[in-house]
Image (cartoon, rainbow, N blue to C red):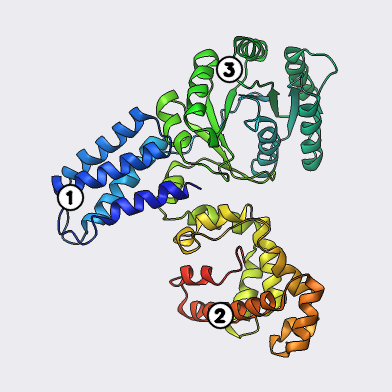
Amino acid sequence: MFEDLSSKIEKAVQSLKGQSRITDVNIAETIREIRRALLDADVNLAVARQFTKDIQERVLGADVLKSVQPGQLFTKIVYDELVHVLGEEKVDLNVSPKPPTIILIAGLQGSGKTTFAGKLARYLKKENNRNPILAAADVYRPAAINQLKTLAEEISVPVYSIDQKDPVRVAKEAVAMAKALALDTVIIDTAGRMHVDEAMMDEVAQIKQAIDPDEILFVVDAMTGQDAVNTAKAFNDAIDFDGVVLTKLDGDTRGGAALSIRTVVEKPIKFMSTGEKLDALSPFYPDRLAKRILGMGDVVSFVERAQQEFDEEQAEKLQRKIRSDKFDLTDFLEQLQKIKKMGNVADLVGMIPGAQKALQGQEISDDAFKPVEAIIQSMTPEERADPNLLNGSRRKRIAKGSGTSVKQVNDLMKQFSQMKKMMKTMSKLGGMGRASQALKSLPFGR
């Protein structure tokens, strides 16, 4: 996520390392480099200019403490300004005091509206204990209705749809059904088109007038940069939406939409999506994304996801195994499978401070663990418990059984051995001081 922007900002800040103080001279080139990085990321020109102007004014007006290096001060100010431009703080959905809460979803075709509708239903059901119903108001594309039904079936949520091309009727009747079934949330998926046009705006406006939604969310494809911002502005002028959803942040995202949209439309970003899976949706925290852009990671989000998969008793049992040197390949396989459940692997790596830099240039995908799982699953229980049993003939058998090579088996055994030593050392120290070195030993993109 924003890897190119992150590396360019980090490179710009490097020029201040070793300086004894900040001056007009040594800050000018750094500011220019940051502005260039923002424009390369397709950030709105006015936003980029104001952002760098605010940084320069704050930096030159700041008192540099003896204990703080100029580079550290500059990074802190850039972080503060990133948080500001991203929206300062998390903004929650509007909730009706009298159920049901009605959420209307709008956006262009291909922005990920329908998938987001399913993700939002899952999120509200799991995280907020709500009982949603989905309304298929994209009545012009049978594929959209079928997709919504498929997503709803995965999360056991009802869908309301009709055979007629009447989106206003769908929305109104879905609300009536929610009331009849005592469901507390209605999520309405509307039709999109390839470009903003009057017919689409009129249709969304008619649905809005008919049901008076508590929340209107505009879904933006984060990969489209300034086009997304311009589209959001047109939609906001027409329907006055309440918040923005950034989708496809796991793709080749330069960052322009995320860093521009809050300022241009003056509406908060409320959710971000980082993958196709239904669990790849998170509330938007400006401070957390700012840290990720600056390569600081997002430990809080990582821990929150981990807590959903690891309970305290399991963690203590694992800690005892590590300390007693009994952590084996079966344990390793179990941990990999739990990590996969936490979400998109590339997104998780971006949450760990220094990880993106440590693994720069390596392909990170959800398939990265498949060869590792296949190798371990091709071993006998005795071999998993004691890798010392793995002589040449056993390794050939495992490679053949897992569809990998002997070299891949050897590499995994070497990485596992190194990881065990490091985990034991970190366990004794009670900290994560050598986490970036650990990442280099993990089997990403091998």
Sequence-wise, which precedes: disc 3 or disc 2?
3
In the orientation shown, which residue stands out farthest toward the right?
163
Disc 1 and disc 3: Cα gap in Å?
45 Å
The disc at residue 418 is 2
Q: Position of residue 244 (x, y in %)?
A: 53, 30
> Do the CB atoms of the residues marked 1 and 3 lie less than 8 Å apart?
no
Name the residue nearer the viewer: 25 or 385. 25
Alpha carbon of mark 2 to alpha carbon of mark 1: how far? 43 Å
Give amino acid for label 3: Val
Residue at point 74% right, 83% down?
395
The answer to whether residue 92 of the structure is visible from this angle is no
Quarter occupied by residue 377:
bottom right
Compared to residue 163, the image places residue 345 above or below, namely: below
Query: Is there a contact, CB below 8 Å, between mark 2 and mark 1?
Result: no
Residue 196 is tagged as: 3
What element does badge 2 sit on?
A: helix
